[in-house]
Image (spheres, grey):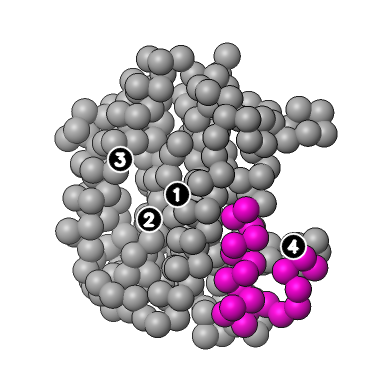
Amino acid sequence: MRLLKDDEELDRIRRAAQITSESFCEMLRHCSPGTGEWELAAALEFGFRKRGASRTAYPTIVGSGRNSCVLHYSDNGRRLEEGDLVLVDGGAEVDLYAGDITRTFPVSGSFSTIQKAVYEVVQRAHECAINVVAPGVALDSIHRVAVSRLVEGLLDLDVLAGSAEEIIANGTYKKFFPHQTSHWLGLDVHDVGDYFVGDQSRILQPGMVLTVEPGLYFPPLIEGVEEFFGIGIRIEDDL
């Protein structure tokens, strides 16, 4: 019952996503060096409430610099610095239903060369994964497409070496992409519903709502990629 939404439920989720999207655009005006992560979170959440959302669907994530590499970071306690990237993951709740969007952007208004290169890899994976989504498609195929594009990008960036097939088979890429590409969305931001039926990936049907959110993260603990340290990029939309 939770996995397949009816028209009223879909309308609520669309409104939550629209409010979230508009509030993200408004929040960007407040982004500059010296701004607190907490200030961006407040600007985003104010946008939600101003547009009629009842509350946030989950604790807002604003991770700048190295904090962008921390999944589910919610301290929001650092000031943004020149040259940082900032990852913002937030969602409005409308009539109990959740939106969930993530964007990553440069604090100073422009990417460095290496930030831009990583961003374009994630953006390409995001676009390709979205293009796969349709009724009749296996959910796992979305993740496999995203992983394939991210691995191609990591090879092009010389972060990984070898064949894409071997890297995917042995999971080497998971140091940089440790989560799944999608989760169900509805009354909860990670809504209920099995991802596999038996040993087969769930087949998408009309009425299902899911996220698409590939990312790449380079925390300082990974050796050999020092020039990428502190870059964390995720792009997420709701379908």
Which is more toward the observer, 50 or 74? 50
Residue 174 position, x and y percent, is: 68, 62
* The stretch drawn in magenta includes residue 125: no
Whether residue 161 is situated above or below residue 25 in the rendered picture: below
Helix or strand or loop: what does disc 2 sit on? Answer: strand
The amino acid type found where label 1 is placed reads Glu
* Residue type for callout 2: Arg
The CA span between labels 2 and 4 is 26 Å
Please state the extent of the stretch shown in magenta in the rendering.
145-166
Q: Which residue is mark 4?
A: 168
Real-space CA distance between mark 3 and mark 1, rounded to the nearest whole angstrom: 12 Å
Q: Residue at x 38, y 27 (%)?
A: 13
Tell me the number on the disc at residue 20. 3
Q: Earlier in the sequence, mark 1 or mark 2?
A: 2
- Say which residue appears at 40% left-offset and 22% top-offset: 10
Q: Which residue is mark 1?
A: 236
Near mark 3 (Cα within 10 A), the count class, few <14, some 14-19 or many ≥20, is many
Estimate how packed mark 1 is, as few (under 14), some (14 to 19) or many (20 or more) residues with alpha carbons within 10 Å.
many
Residue 216 at x, y percent in the picture: 54, 64
